[in-house]
Structure formats: C-alpha cells, structure tokens
Image (cartoon, rainbow, N blue to C red):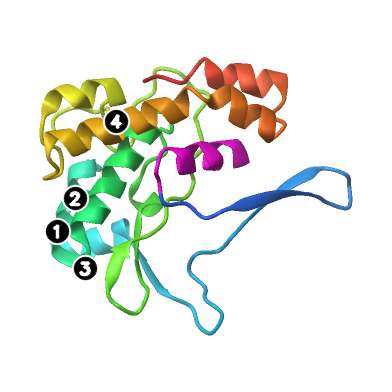
Amino acid sequence: MLACLKMAKAAGINVHGGELVEDITGRDVLLLQRFDISESHRRHLISINGLRKDAYQRDDAGVFRYDDVHKLLQSHSVDFREDAEQLLRQMLFNRAINNTGDHERNFSMINDGSGYRLSPAYDLVPSLTTGAYHIAGYQFSPYPPKPSEIIKQGKVFGLDKTTVKNIAEQIMDAIQQWENFAAECKVGDSDYSAIKGLLSI
C-alpha cells in the first residue's frame, strides 16, 4: 500500500517508491520501483532465510527473531551501524502498523558492488487480524517491541540509547501522520479506519 510506503519513508526507513496507475478495467494498481535492478545489471540479492540456512544448517523449529537478522548483519554487512539502525526502524515500524508478516523472506541483503547491505524494506503491509503473533519475535518475546517501549531498554542492536530514542520518536511521529498519508494516497474510508484502529505506538 502506497500510504504505508510513504509513512515508512517518513519514519526514516530505506524504501523505494511506487505510484498508483489505472489499469484497463479502471482499477487502481500499485507499481513498485525495483531496487534490485540498475540500468546495466541486476544486483545480487539474498534473503535472510537463505543466509540463515547457509550460516546455521540446522532446524530452528520455526523460531525467528529480529536478533537473528542482527547477527547476520554483524557477519555480512559492509556498513553494520547503518544497517542496524535500519533494522531497528523496520522492527518498530512493523509492530506499529501490525505487520505480522515479518518473516525471513521479507528481509534481504543486497550487493551494490561494494559489498552486502540490508536491502531497502519491502512488503510493509498491515495485517487486519488483531491479536496475532508476529512471525519475528525479539529477544524472549514473541512480539517486537512498540516504539514507546524500546526507549526504556537502553542499547538495542548495539546502538546507543540516544540513537534508539531518536529512531523511536521518528517512528512515532510518522505513525501519527497516518491521516495525512491516507488522504494523500486516497485510501478509502473503510481501509483508513481499519488501519487506524491497528496502529500502535
């Protein structure tokens, strides 16, 4: 959903754009800008799911946590601090919009020629089901934390307390602008209200 992409960008998340166009039946279709293709070649992309299988070669019994992504970034990212900040933003944003589909294939690393980095975020879509567990937990919780909760935790993903606080506040500010993003993207009244009821900071 385009409104969520715009809200994610306001939250400081690295996302590529999109636009709504009308198809031949008169319906609106969202076209997303590809981030894995440049003008001359395709950038190598590997999902966190693929990296976990390569790195661990073990059955994790379906358990997946944001901590696992963080550990892989430590091993593979050429700009670990920036990627750790992006991971924190994605974790808090996914919780805030109730995106419970935060599984291993919805996080990837991409090589732009200088090495591997956390790819731009994708599939940032709220789930309209309330009370469901997120696929990715955090530490010993089945849920990632809310932005307002993370401020009390101090360091997160190796980031200092001030950075964590600033990121959390930027996420909260973006979420509070949902009405503006929804209006800009012409979100229908029923969808606007359903998503607004799920937002949690």
Image height check: is 149 above or below 33? above
From mark 4 to mark 1, how far is it between C-alphas? 22 Å
From mark 1 to mark 2, how far is it between C-alphas? 6 Å
In this rendering, the label closer to the viewer, 1 or 3: 3
The segment highlighted magenta reads 1-13
Marking on residue 74: 1
Answer whether residue 57 is visible to the viewer in this image: no
Give the x, y percent position of residue 157.
15, 44
Tell me whether the residue at label 3 lies in contact with that at label 2, contact meaning CB atoms closer than 8 angstroms: no
For label 4, the residue is 168
From mark 2 to mark 4, how far is it between C-alphas? 18 Å
Q: Main secondary structure of the magenta part?
A: helix
From mark 3 to mark 2, how far is it between C-alphas? 13 Å
Tag 3: amino acid: Val
For label 3, the residue is 78
The first of marks 4 and 3 along the sequence is 3
